[in-house]
Image: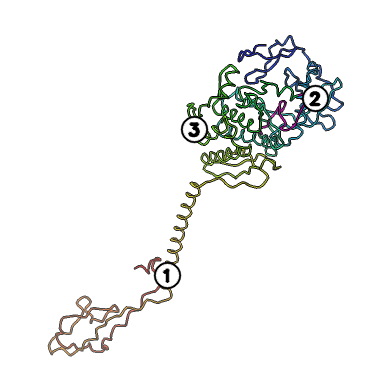
């Protein structure tokens, strides 16, 4: 059949004319609804007296995926059953069994979990997996076209967690694409949160193992497996693959999430594969995107999309570590806060990754952290230098304030302990009063007419010479010397006496 999207040809299923776009792997169903059975024959049946099939979740040329309930524990699951009319295909059967075997080896929370596998009563192989709620990356890109940079980086980091475990166990996925990356809604204590999971290990390769059924086909000249839009150069040439092929493919997915377009958007599969082999992709900053692109991101994508596998990040952990440093730097720059450092396990580490909220600017941001030994903190020299300047300024102010208060208290204490000496009052000894000459009147006060008496306040000595002896009035004692004034109070007036 010819694909209506890219014009390429694909092999359709016998009954429903369904298949996948040969260029980007998009699921296609070409037959009208009336030509398909109204009710799937598996719906309502019980598989091996354990799984009751309730509805169809999706169907393709090789089989269908159903919503079912595990009767003994009451858990909802997804069951993938190989189509009955495809059972005769030994390659398809071998691939289905290998998928069940490989998924059962993986326990990362970022890989879809397999619970069980077996054969139905009619001999159809089935695989029981966790039931996911959410949408695939392919569905999200079709809805929003492009994803915000930090969200895309975070999704890529989570995919790398899944690949890290798979690669450590010798498994190469070989068919990463947006439809096989799933944004699953997971219920937690604080409500639903989103976690990225990797699906469909159907054509995964276990490195170093010989599979007589599959290897005969895979080693044929010109045999190519995967999706052309996201193939690595060595995969497009049919060369032997290792884990670095998956890292190239993830680079193409990250590029598309941020830019809203594939690395190479030609419509012919052969042309796209040739470009993966020979053509260097355009840098994100040269695409005129409406968002700022860090220079480090373009450098990392240039490494990940290198034609030579030796120039790419050596492992999924190394790729994730570079993305993680960039992710934390971007969050810190946008929020003004440093976030907790997350560790990156080695390929053989069993540390499990979970999502935890980190509050920045009063809004929770989901970040992935590891329950394991922490990796060295990223370089934050500018932030540390600003913090050091602020600390030194605050310390200098505190020293100045304490010094001023201590000086104030010391001066005040000295004033209270040492009384202010009384001022020296200079008094004029009383003049010698002589009797006036006969016939002259006595000296009297011009205001009251009374005799002038010395005031209690100190008086300045008169510079005018005495006119003659003055005789005291009869019956009155002679004037005495003025008493000395009392010393002033040592208590400060209005709190500022010590400054006056």
Please report the residue visible at 64 percent of the width from the left and 22 percent of the height from the top.
227
The residue wearing badge 2 is 126
Of 471 and 386, the residue lying toward us: 386
Q: Can you tell which of label 2 and label 1 is closer to the viewer?
A: 2
Tag on residue 412? 1
Could you say whether the residue bearing mark 3 is in a helix, strand or loop? loop
Residue 461, x across and y down, in percent:
21, 80
Magenta stretch encompasses residue 209: yes
Left or right side of 97 for 147 = left
Q: Are marks 2 and 1 in contact (CB under 8 Å)?
A: no
Q: Mark 2 packing: few (<14 Cα in 10 Å), some, or many (20+)?
A: many
Residue 230 occupies quadrant = top right
Of 215 and 144, the residue lying toward us: 215
Please report the residue visible at 54 percent of the width from the left and 32 percent of the height from the top.
302
Of 66 and 123, the residue lying toward us: 123
The residue wearing badge 3 is 292
The earlier-in-sequence mark between 3 and 2 is 2
Residue 209 occupies quadrant = top right
Residue 431, x across and y down, in percent:
21, 87
Q: Find the distance from the CA under tag 3 to the CA under tag 2.
A: 47 Å
Could you say whether the residue bearing mark 1 is in a helix, strand or loop? helix
The earlier-in-sequence mark between 2 and 1 is 2
Q: Are marks 3 and 2 in contact (CB under 8 Å)?
A: no
The earlier-in-sequence mark between 3 and 1 is 3
Quadrant where the C terminus sits is bottom left
Left or right side of 212 for 373 = left
Magenta stretch encompasses residue 113: no
Q: Find the distance from the CA under tag 3 to the CA under tag 1.
A: 62 Å
Range of magenta residues? 195-213
Residue 51 occupies quadrant = top right
């Amino acid at each position: 059949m010819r694909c209506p999207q890219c014009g390429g040809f694909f092999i359709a299923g016998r009954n429903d004319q369904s298949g996948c776009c040969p260029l980007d792997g998009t699921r296609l169903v070409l037959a009208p609804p009336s030509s398909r059975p109204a009710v799937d024959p598996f719906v309502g049946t019980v598989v091996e007296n354990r799984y009751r099939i309730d509805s169809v979740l999706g169907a393709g040329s090789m089989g269908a995926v159903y919503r079912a309930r595990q009767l003994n524990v009451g858990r909802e699951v997804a069951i993938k059953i190989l189509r009955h009319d495809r059972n005769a295909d030994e390659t398809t059967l071998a691939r289905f069994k290998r998928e069940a075997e490989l998924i059962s080896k993986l326990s990362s929370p970022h890989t879809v979990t397999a619970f069980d596998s077996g054969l139905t009563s009619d001999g159809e192989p089935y695989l029981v997996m966790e039931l996911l709620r959410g949408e695939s990356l392919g569905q999200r890109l079709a809805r929003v076209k492009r994803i915000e940079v930090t969200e895309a980086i975070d999704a890529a980091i989570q995919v790398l967690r899944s690949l890290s475990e798979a690669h450590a166990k010798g498994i190469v996925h070989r068919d990463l694409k947006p439809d096989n990356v799933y944004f699953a809604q997971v219920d937690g204590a604080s409500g639903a949160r989103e976690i990225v999971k990797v699906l469909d290990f159907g054509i995964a390769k276990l490195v170093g193992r010989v599979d007589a059924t599959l290897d005969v086909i895979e080693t044929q000249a010109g045999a190519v497996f995967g999706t052309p839009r996201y193939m690595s150069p060595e995969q497009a040439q049919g060369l032997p693959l290792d884990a670095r092929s998956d890292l190239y493919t993830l680079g193409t997915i990250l590029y598309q999430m941020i830019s809203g377009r594939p690395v190479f958007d030609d419509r012919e599969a052969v042309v796209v594969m040739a470009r993966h082999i020979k053509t260097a992709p355009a840098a994100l900053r040269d695409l005129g995107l409406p968002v700022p692109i860090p220079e480090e991101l373009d450098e990392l994508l240039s490494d990940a999309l290198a034609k030579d596998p030796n120039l790419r990040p050596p492992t999924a952990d190394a790729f994730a570590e570079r993305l993680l440093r960039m992710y934390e730097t971007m969050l810190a720059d946008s929020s003004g806060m440093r976030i907790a450092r997350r560790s990156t396990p080695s390929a053989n580490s069993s540390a499990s990754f979970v999502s935890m909220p980190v509050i920045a600017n009063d809004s929770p941001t989901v970040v992935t952290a590891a329950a394991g030994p922490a990796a060295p903190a990223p370089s934050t020299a500018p932030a540390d230098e600003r913090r050091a300047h602020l600390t030194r300024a605050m310390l200098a102010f505190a020293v100045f304030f304490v010094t001023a208060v201590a000086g104030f208290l010391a001066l005040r204490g000295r004033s209270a302990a040492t009384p202010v000496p009384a001022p020296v009052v200079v008094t004029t000894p009383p003049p010698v009063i002589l009797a006036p000459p006969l016939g002259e009147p006595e000296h009297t006060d011009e205001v009251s007419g009374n005799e002038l008496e010395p005031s209690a306040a100190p008086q300045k000595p008169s510079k005018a010479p005495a006119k003659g002896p003055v005789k005291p009035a009869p019956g009155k004692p002679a004037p005495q010397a003025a008493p000395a004034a009392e010393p002033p109070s040592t208590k400060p007036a209005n709190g500022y006496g010590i400054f006056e």
